[in-house]
Image (cartoon, rainbow, N blue to C red):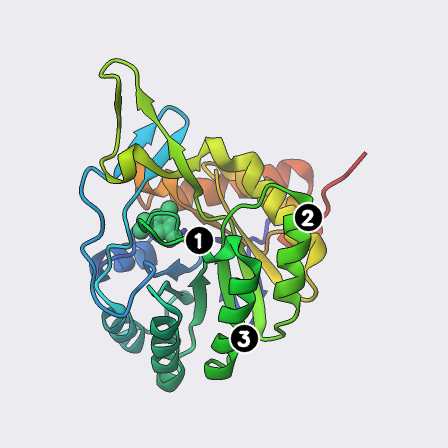
């Protein structure tokens, strides 16, 4: 008797779960697998103007409490995802999101113009936070650069859109980024968080790093990042005016999904757990979330969304 559905920005999801961009979404086949699962929506791999091979392998590793990755945006090029979105059954299927992560502002504007011209019913998630491109800083950590990028983006792209943010760790930074984001009315949602950038996982036996790029540094996901993800969801939920927050980070059961929603998340993405467990995780997490709500006496997500208690 529990209703897990959520409707936001014209998107109707049967449940709040979908894949974190990057996981199970590089090829049509992978996207179709998410679409065929119990996920409530799906999102594509962050695309670039041209196809990319990405960083040298190994570039993903499971770690004791999560994962490390330095994929380097391997993707089939934006045209591939645009074609997928054009062929997609938007009426009959679950909502489709498109992640865009250009190597430059110009590239982002060109891709966004193409998605604008295609006029498809899918929401863009503009990735301002890839930590794995050697020599390229994460835009989201530069407030002025973020403001400039968004000013140019909204000149070209007039539909509602969202941004994927890196994790912040200081109240001053939450406030500064929120004030930048609040000055863009068509920016309707933020996804918190991308991986915690440039962590280092060490294998004690071999006395070695576990991934090849960047001397072993990579973005951390999984259990390691749950408290950071929840803090970012909570703070942006408090500080943003009239925008949705999508939670991402450390979700591996109904419990973490519940926590993200309690902190204010409208919907919740699954990264490391999806990578490790496969698309079956969606039905499991969905059923666990429903059971937890039942146990707590909640009938809908709105009954507890954002209602985190403080002391
Ligand atoms: O952890 C991440 N890995 N975040 C991104 O935004 C990009 C991805 C990659 O391809 O390296």
Q: Name the residue under label 2.
A: 172
Residue 220 appears left or right of 247: left
Which of the two labelled residues, at mark 3 and mark 1, occupies the earlier sequence position? 1
Residue 88 appears left or right of 260: left
Residue 163 appears left or right of 51: right
Residue in the picture at 25% in, 57% down: 26
Which of the two labelled residues, at mark 1 and mark 2, occupies the earlier sequence position? 1
Q: Residue 138 carries which label?
A: 1
Residue in the picture at 32% in, 55% down: 34
Q: Residue 21 carries which label?
A: none
**Observer-nearest of 157 and 90:** 157
Please identify the residue farthest to the bottom as the structure is shown.
Answer: 117
**Observer-nearest of 60 and 8:** 60
Q: Under tag 2, what secondary structure?
A: helix
Q: Under tag 3, what secondary structure?
A: helix
Q: Is mark 2 within 8 Å of ligand 1?
A: no
Q: Where is residue 253 in the image (x, y as percent from the top left)?
A: 48, 36
**Observer-nearest of 271 and 153:** 153
Which of the two labelled residues, at mark 3 and mark 2, occupies the earlier sequence position? 3
Q: Quadrant of residue 103?
A: bottom left
Q: Name the residue under label 3.
A: 151
In this rendering, the count of numbered labels is: 3
Q: Quadrant of residue 42?
A: bottom left
Q: Does residue 223 lie above or below 52 as drawn?
A: above
Q: In which quarter of the image is residue 64?
A: top left
Q: Residue 255: in sight, yes or no? A: no
């Amino acid at each position: 008797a529990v209703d897990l559905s959520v409707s936001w920005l014209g998107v109707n999801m049967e449940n709040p779960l979908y894949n974190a961009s990057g996981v199970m979404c590089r090829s049509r086949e992978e996207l179709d697998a998410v679409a065929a699962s119990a996920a409530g929506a799906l999102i594509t791999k962050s695309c670039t103007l041209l196809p990319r091979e990405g960083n040298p392998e190994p570039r993903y590793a499971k770690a004791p409490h999560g994962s490390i990755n330095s994929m380097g945006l391997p993707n089939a090029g934006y045209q591939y995802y645009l074609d997928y979105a054009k062929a997609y059954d938007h009426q009959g299927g679950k909502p489709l999101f498109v992640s865009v992560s250009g190597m430059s502002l110009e590239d982002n504007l060109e891709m966004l113009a193409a998605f604008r011209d295609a006029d498809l019913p899918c929401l863009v998630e503009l990735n301002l936070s890839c930590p794995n491109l050697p020599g390229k800083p994460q835009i989201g950590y530069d407030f002025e650069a973020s403001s400039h990028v968004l000013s140019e983006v909204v000149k070209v792209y007039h539909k509602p859109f969202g941004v994927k943010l890196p994790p912040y760790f200081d109240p001053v930074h939450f406030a500064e980024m929120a004030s930048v984001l609040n000055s863009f009315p068509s920016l309707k949602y933020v996804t918190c968080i991308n991986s915690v950038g440039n962590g280092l996982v060490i294998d004690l036996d071999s006395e070695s790093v576990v991934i090849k790029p960047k001397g072993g540094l990579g973005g951390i996901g999984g259990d390691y990042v749950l408290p950071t993800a929840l803090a970012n969801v909570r703070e942006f939920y408090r500080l943003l005016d009239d925008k949705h927050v999508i939670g991402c980070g450390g979700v591996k059961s109904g419990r973490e999904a519940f926590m993200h929603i309690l902190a204010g998340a409208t919907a919740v993405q699954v990264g490391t757990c999806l990578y490790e467990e496969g698309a079956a995780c969606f039905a499991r997490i969905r059923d666990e979330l429903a059971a937890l709500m039942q146990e707590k006496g909640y009938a809908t997500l709105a009954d507890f969304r954002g209602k985190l208690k403080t002391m």
